[in-house]
Amino acid sequence: MLTVSTRRDVERIMVVPAGEIDLASVDTLAAELAAAIDSDASCIQVDLSAVTFVDSVGIHALLKGRRLAEESAKAYAVNGADGVVREVLELTGVWNHLTGQP
Amino acid sequence: MTLSVPRQIASVPLLRQLLDVVLRHRDVTARCRAGLAVLISEASANAVRHGHGDRPIEASIDVDDEQCVIEIGNCNGHLDQSRLLAGMPTPDQESGRGLPLIGTLADAVHVLHPRPAWVVVRITKRLEHEPVEAGGR
């Protein structure tokens, strides 16, 4: 079960998924990320603090969001992951890439 | 426990939640359950995406005091065991993490071809249990 809310703050859009990101729910996240990148906001921030589960399908969506944002010359950063979600993102080697750290 | 589930995306959370209920019942630690949740999701998502036609996914969950063995089978041509041992792709690559993630989190993984055009991924993981309180269990 996943719900995704978005919040606009001047130039920035916050995308906040809550729940489990897997094959059954990933399309909801991908659609919200694509809409945020398509908007006129210059910065997309993805807050994962309410995500309780992520697997490689969710990682694919987060990485694709980063690429689409980059192609549209927009800032994109993921933050807020902790516990098992953070561990999976670190184990798969994408955490620094998604948070924009070198 | 053996069950047949439709080759549909909704089967992924169904199998994950079912496994979690079984493991909670056996006082398996949250950390260990989290690893197994990723393992069964990756294996069943693979089966949903790469299986053929209307044939269901066959899942089996076998838990004892020591370990959990998950088998996810689907109708498919072939899966090469070596792909489970592959390293993680570089961060700029968007795909290809599912099988290496299974290989990393599991204690053992085997790809079986028990009958023609059928592939089974068998995942074994040792269990960690919450400490037993006095008078408990």
Image (cartoon, coloured by chain):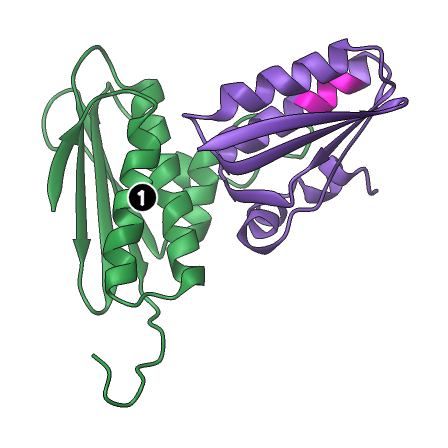
Which residue is more in the foreground, A19 or B100?
A19
Q: Is residue A96 above or below residue A75?
A: below
Residue at 23%, 68% (x, y): give it.
Answer: B66
Whether residue A86 can be seen here: yes
> Looking at numbered disc 1 in the image, what kind of residue is underneath it?
Gln
Whether residue B123 can be seen here: no
**Horizontal and vertical percent position of residue A56:** 50, 34
Chain A's colour? purple
The stretch of residues the image draws in magenta is A65-69
Q: Residues within 10 Å of mark 1 (few under 14, many from 20)?
A: some
The residue beneath circle 1 is B17
Residue at 80%, 19% (x, y): give it.
Answer: A70
Chain B's colour? green
**Horizontal and vertical percent position of residue B61:** 19, 48
**Horizontal and vertical percent position of residue B45:** 36, 29
Residue at 64%, 27% (x, y): give it.
Answer: A5
| SS at badge 1 | helix
Q: Is residue A37 above or below residue B118?
A: above
